[in-house]
Image (cartoon, rainbow, N blue to C red):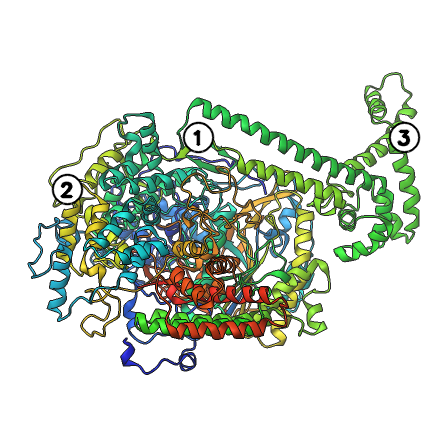
Amino acid sequence: MNAESTPLFSRRAMLQQSSAGFGWLAFSALASSAAAASAPRDPLAPKKPHFPARAKRVIFLFMKGGPSHVDTFDPKPLLDRDHGKPPPFDLPRVKFAETGNLLRSPWKFRHYGQSGLEVSDLFPHVGQCADDLCVVRSMYGTNPAHGGALLKLHTGSDVSVRPSMGAWVSYGLGTENHDLPAFVTICPTLAHGGVNNWGSAFLPAWTQGTPLGNASVPASQAVVKHIARAGMTAEMQRMQLDLVGDFNHAYSEIAGRQDALEARINSFELAYRMQSTLPELQDISGETQATRKLYGLDDPVTANFGRQCLMARRFCERGVRFVQVTHSDAFVQWDQHGDLLKGHSKNAAEVDKPIAGLLKDLRSRGLLEDTLVLWGGEFGRTPVAQGTNGRDHNPHGFTMWMAGGGVKGGHVHGATDDYGYYAQEDKVHIHDLHATLLHLLGLDHERLTYRYAGRDFRLTDIAGHVVHEVMA
Amino acid sequence: MLLVTQARRAADGRIVSWTYMNPTLPATLRGLAMSSLIGLLGGVTSRVGAVEPDAAGVEFFEKKVRPVLIARCYECHSVEAGKSKGGLVLDSREGLLKGGDTGPGLVAGNADKSLIIEAARYKNQDMQMPPKKAIPADELKILEDWVAMGAPDPRSAVASSMPVKKVRVIDIAKDSKHWAFQPVLAVTPPAIEGVRNPIDAFIVSRLRRAGLELSAPADKRTLIRRATFDLIGLPPTVAEVDAFLADTAPDAFAKVVERLLRSPHYGEKWGRHWLDVARYADSNGLDENIALGTAWRFRDYVVNSFNEDKPFDQFLTEQLAGDLLPARSVEQRHEQSVATAFLNLGAKVLAEPDKDKLVMDVVDEQIDVMGRAFMGMTFGCARCHDHKFDPIPQDDYYALGAIFKSTASFSSERTGAISYWFETPTGSLDDFAAAKAAELALDAKKKAVSAAVSAADKALKDDARAHAVDYLMAATRLPLQPTLTEARQVAEPLGLKGEILVNTRVYLAANTTDATFAPWHEAMKAGHPEKIAAHYKELFALVEKTPESVAKKTTAKVADGENVAEAEVDKGSAESSAVEAARKALNDPRGFLALPPEPHLIYPKDVAEKVHRLKDEQDETEKHLPDLPTAIGVHDADKILSDLAVHIRGNHMALGKLVSRGVPQVMQVNMRGKTSFPKQSSGRLELAQWLTSADHPLTSRVLVNRVWAWHFGKGIVGSVDNFGMLGDTPSHPELLDWLSRWVMENGWSLKDLHRLILTSAAWQQGSAPKISNVDPENKLLSFFPVRRLEAEEVRDALLQVAGKLDLSMGGKTVPLRNRQFVFNHTSMDATKYDSRRRALYLPIIRNNLYDLFQQFDYPDPAVSTGLRSSTVVSPQALLLMNSPLSADAAQGLAARVDAVSKDVDLRLRALWKMAYARDILPDEVGRCRNFLVAADASLASSVSNPEARDARAWELLCQAVLMASEFIYLR
C-alpha cells in the first residue's frame, strides 16, 4: 500500500470497517506478508464447522489432582466385599508409587433420577442432575504423574509442547464475540505444565487461552492482566489514546501505510473497549439472589468455585467458545495419597453444589442444549490403598462425565474391571475423548490440522476414535 | 502430594520378535497403541507355516474362526476395510502369517506363543486386542483351538491388493538433488556498474530482472537508529546521534558500525538470537518446573563468544562436543564444558516414571535441536518412521541416536520421582566446600520453621484435646456432612474451631461402631445427647489420671498373668483397654480431633505471622544460597554404543535391527570424506567435524541465512528452520551460496559478515513501501522492511529512554537455587521481573513466561526458534497503557525532560530526540501543547497542586510518546 493510493486516513472509518477481536490482527508482519498483502481478515471470525455441530461451546470443569472414580461415579461392590485383601490382578509395569491391598470406598452410592444413575454421597447435588450426565467410566490415559497427565489431557501430548484443546477449538471455530477472547481459563494452575495447558504452541497466538487470575487467586479477584490502571480516569485515558492515535497516523504516513501499523492503531481501541467489557462481564451484582444461591455463593465453602462456575456461564452467554474452570487450591487439590476421606469430602463439598448449580442454570436458560460440559481430572485413583487410607494415581481406568451439547443424559458408557483398576469395556482413551469433543463441535479431528515444522499436526496426533455411542 | 520413587523395570534384553504395548509410549505412539494392534506384529518374513488345511480344518475355520475374525478384527486389519493398523492385515492367510511391524501373527500349533492369542487373552496389560473390550471366552477358545490344530486357513493370498498405505520409498540419490543438499556453489557476483558491495550486485541484478531498483538511502537519523537496535538492541543516545550527524566523512557510518560491533552489548543482542535457537531457559518447564539454576553460565558463554567473534565452526563444535576437546587451561576446559549445555537445555518430563523412555525422549530432543539449529532439518519425524517428506530414513535417525545415547545427560542423583540433568563441575574443591557450608545455614532456617510449625500444631492439638468433650457435644448439633459455615456457627460461640469441628462430625459419622464412640451414637439415637458430656468427661478424666506408663504396665502384667487374680485381670483389662482406646482416640493425629489439612490457616494471628516470617526467611536464604560451582552440560556415557537398535514406531520396548553410528546419508552424497567413529567416545566430536567440514551443504547456508534474516526480518530462504523438501526455495540462491562460501573462507567470522551486510546499499536503503505487483512480498528487497522491536528491545528501550536501564553484564540472575521449584504444586509464582538490568538477564521461566515477553512474541523457550514472529494483539496495547513498567518508564522520561528546561518547546524538542532520535515537527508541537492544556483541565478536579498536575500531564504525554508506533517500530 502507498500513502498516495488511499485518501486521508480516517480512524473512525477504519474502526467501523474492521470487526476486530480480542487477540486478532495476529497476522504476522514478517512471515505471512502474503496474507497481509490481501485485505486483513479477522482470523477470529466464526468459522463453519466441518459438519453440523451438536455443541457450540465447551465448559471444562477440571478437578486438579485426580478425583477417585471408585468413590464418585464408578461404584465397585467387589471392592467393598474384598476390602483389605491383596488385589487379585496384576499391577501395571510402570507404577507411580507402591500400593497395598484393596481399599473400600468410604462413601455410599445412591441411584438418582429416572435413569437410576449411581452417584456417591460425595456428590448429592450433582446426583440430582443425573439424567443430564453421560458418565464415561472407561477413560484411560498413560501418564501416571501429574505433569505428564495434565499435559496429555489438555494438549494430547506429554512429550512435547503442543497446542491445548481450547486453542484447537478456537482455531477451528473462531469466536462469536469480537470483544472477548475465544478461549478463557479461570483460575488455572501454573504447576504441572502451567501455561502449556492453555497455550497455543505453534498455532497462531490468538488461539491461546486468556487466563483470569490463577489457582492461588480467589475467583473474586481473578482478572485479565493489565486490564485497568489505578488512578486513571476514562476521560484521561481517552485523551491520551487520541494523542497516540494522532502520532500513529502521522507515522503511518512517514513509514508508509503498512497493515501492521494500522492494526496497531486498532489494537488500542480494542484494548480500550475491553477495559469496560471484561469488568462488566465479571461483575455478578446483576445476578438474582436465587441464582447466587443456586451456585452456592452464599456459603463460604462453595462461594469461590461457585463464582468460577457462574463466570463460566456468563462467558458462554457472550459467545466465548471454550471456558475452562479449574478446581485447585495452592496444593494438588484432589491428590489424596492419604486421608482420602477428609480430602475428598472437603473437595467435593466445594464443587458439588456449584457444578449442579451450573448444570441447572444452563438448562433453565436453554444453554445446555448446545453447551458441552466436561468434568474430570487428569487421572483417577487406585482401588488399592496407598498407606492406610489413601489412593495412588491411576491413569489406567477412570471416569469423566459430559453433559449437554448433544450427549446422552443419564447414560453410562464403558466400564472398568470389577475393582476399578483398568478400563475394560468400551475403553475411551484421552485421544478418543478429544476426537469426540471435536466431533460434537462439528469438527473432524482428522481434518483439523495445522502444518508446522514440516508436518501436519492434530490434537489427536495420529490416533483418536469418535465415541458415537455417547451421542444423543 | 507424595513423590515416591516408583518401581521401574528396564527391558531385560532386547525383544526382537514382538513387543509389549507399553503404556508410556511417546505420544505419537500411544494413540496407535490404543486403537490397534500396532507395533505388535512385525515385519520378519514368515518362518512359521501353517498346515495345509484338510476338509475338517476348513470347515472349522469357515464355521467358527472366520466369523470371529470378521466381527472382531477386520475393522482395523483388512483389505476390505482398507486398514492395516500396525502393518497387519488378518483377512488373508499370508497377512496373518507375515504379521505386522514386529512379527508373525501366530505360531501354528502353539497358542501360547501366538501373538493374536496373547492379545485376545487380554492378560498382558500392554497388549490387548480388540482395543475397546476383550472378546467373549467362547470366541477366544475358538481361536486357541484353531491355532492349536495348526491354524488351517483356506483363504487365498490377497497380498497384491493389501491395503498397505502407499509407503514412500526414500530414494537418497534422487532426493540428494534437492537444492539444499547440493554442494555450495562457487559463484561470482554479477558485474554491475557503480556497485561495489557483492551483496548489492546480487540484489540489484535480481531486482532489475523484475524491473525494480533499490530505494534511495535512508536518512542518517533513520540509519543510526536502525543500526543501533540491529547490532546492540538499544536505542542510540542523543549524543551518539549528534556525533554521527556532525561527522561528514565518507566513512562516518562505517565508524558507527565498528563502534557498535566493539560494544559489549553487541554480544547481548546477537547472543540473544542464538539463545532462541538454543531454546535457552532458566527453568525446566513441562511437568516439574525446577530451576535450571546454572544455565546462565551458558547464556554468558554465548554472549562472550559473540563478543569475541569466536569462529562459528568452533562455536558449533564446543556446543556439541566441548567436553571432548583438548584444553590449554582449566578455564578453557570449563568454558568448553559449559558450551555443551546446548544439548541439555531442553524441557524434560523429569517425573517420567519410565526412565528408559525418558532417556530416549532426551536423545530425541537433542537430535531435533541439533538438526534444526545447524542443518535446518526436522529429524524428529524419523523417530517413529521414515521421514514423510525429507530423505531421512529411520535408520539415519538411530545412527545419530547411537551418538547421543552414548552421551550422558542425566545425573545419578534424583529426588523422589524427579530425575536431574547432569551438571559438570566448574569450580575447585574449595568452591564446593564453601557451597556446602552455606547449606548448613539453610538447614538451620529449615529447622526453625519446622520447630515453629510443630509448636503451633501442638498448641492447637492441646487446645483441641482440652476441649475434647466440647467438640463431641458441639458435633451433636451438626448434620452428617456439615458445611464449614454451619460448623463455624456452632463452634465459634463456644471458643472452638469450625475447621476441627467439621472433621469431628465427619469422623463420628464414619466411625459408628468404634468402641470409644459407640456411646456417642447410642446417646444420639436415644435422643439424649446430654448424656454424652457426662460419659466422656469421666472417660477422658480417667485418661488424664492414668499415666500411660502405668496403663502399659497393667496391660503387660495382664499379659504375663503372673500373681494376679483372674477376676481382677478381667476387670482391669476391660477398664484399661477402654481407657487406652480413648487415649488413642485423643492422640490420633487423624482422629476426631484432627487438625485441618492446612493447620496454618487456623493458627492464632501472631503465631501464623511468626511461621510465615520464618518461612519467608528460609525461602530468602535458599534463594541467595550459592549454587554448587557446576554447569548444566553433557559428558560421554560409561557405555559407548557403536550401534543402536531401530525403535519400531519409536517404542523403546520394541527394538528392531541394529544400525551403526553415523551421519545422515543424504548430505553425505555430495561430500568427500567419510566419518568414522572412535570406540572410546560418543562420536559427538566427529559429528561436529562433519557439520563444519567445508563441503557440508547445509551448515554454512543455514548460518548465513539466519544472520541475513536477523538483519532483514526474513531469510533468503524464508523457512529459516526448514531447508528440507517442504521448505521455501531461496529467493537469491546465488547470493546464498556466495555468502556461505565467503563466510567459510573468511574463517567463519560473524562480525565480518555484519560489516559486509551493513555496508550494503540493500541494508541502508529507505523503507517506504513501493506498490509492486511483481514483488508484493518484497522478497527482492526493493525497500527496507519496517520491523517492530523485539520483546527485549521494547523493554530495554523503555527503561533506556527513562534513564533507568542498568547495563551491568553477566552473572546469575534467576532468583532460584539450582533445581529449586519455581512453584511447587502451588500456583504462586514468586518470580519478579522488576530488575532494571537488560531483558536478556530477566528469568526465562518456561510455563510462565514474563507477560511482556509473552505478548511481544518471545518464542516458546522449549522450542528452537530461528526467527520470531511479529504479531499485533490487544494485550500489547493493554500492557503499554496500564502496566507498572510503562508508567515507570514514562515517569523516568518525564523527569529527564523536566531536567532539560522549564520551557515547554525546549522540553518537547528534547523529548523527541530522546525517544525518536529526530527533531519534533511544528504540527507535533501544537498537538502536544493542546494535550498538555486539556490534560491539565481534566486533572484539575483530582490534583489540586498545579506543579504536581503539570508533572502528571507530562508523564501522560511521555507515555503517549512511548506507546506510539514510532517508538516501537524501526524504519
> Residue A364 vs residue B426: left or right?
right
Q: Is residue B161 above or below residue B101?
A: below
Residue behind mark 2: B694
Label 2: few (<14), some (14–19) or many (≥20) C-alpha neighbours in 10 Å: some
Q: Quadrant of the N terminus of chain B?
A: top right
Calculate the distance from the C-alpha at mark 2 to the C-alpha at mark 1.
Answer: 37 Å
Q: Which amino acid type is marked by label 1?
A: Pro
Label 3: few (<14), some (14–19) or many (≥20) C-alpha neighbours in 10 Å: few
Q: Is residue B828 above or below residue B162?
A: above
Residue behind mark 3: B545
Residue behind mark 1: B629
Q: Are marks 2 and 1 on the same chain?
A: yes
Chain letter of the residue beneath label 3 in the structure image = B
Q: Which amino acid type is marked by label 2?
A: Ala
Q: Classify mark 1: helix, strand or loop.
A: loop
Q: Are marks 2 and 1 in contact (CB under 8 Å)?
A: no
Q: Are marks 1 and 3 on the same chain?
A: yes
Q: Which mark is residue A17?
A: none
Q: Are marks 2 and 3 on the same chain?
A: yes
Of B39 and A24, the residue lying toward us:
A24
Q: Position of residue B878 (x, y in %)?
A: 49, 65
Comes first in the chain, label 2 or label 3: 3
Chain letter of the residue beneath label 2 in the structure image = B
What residue is at 22 percent from the left and 34 percent from the top?
B686
Q: Classify mark 3: helix, strand or loop.
A: helix
**Residue B948's quadrant in the figure?**
bottom right
**Residue A45's quadrant in the figure?**
bottom left
What residue is at 78 percent from the left and 43 percent from the top?
B592
Q: From this viewpoint, is residue A431 visible?
A: no
Of B293 and A393, the residue lying toward us:
B293
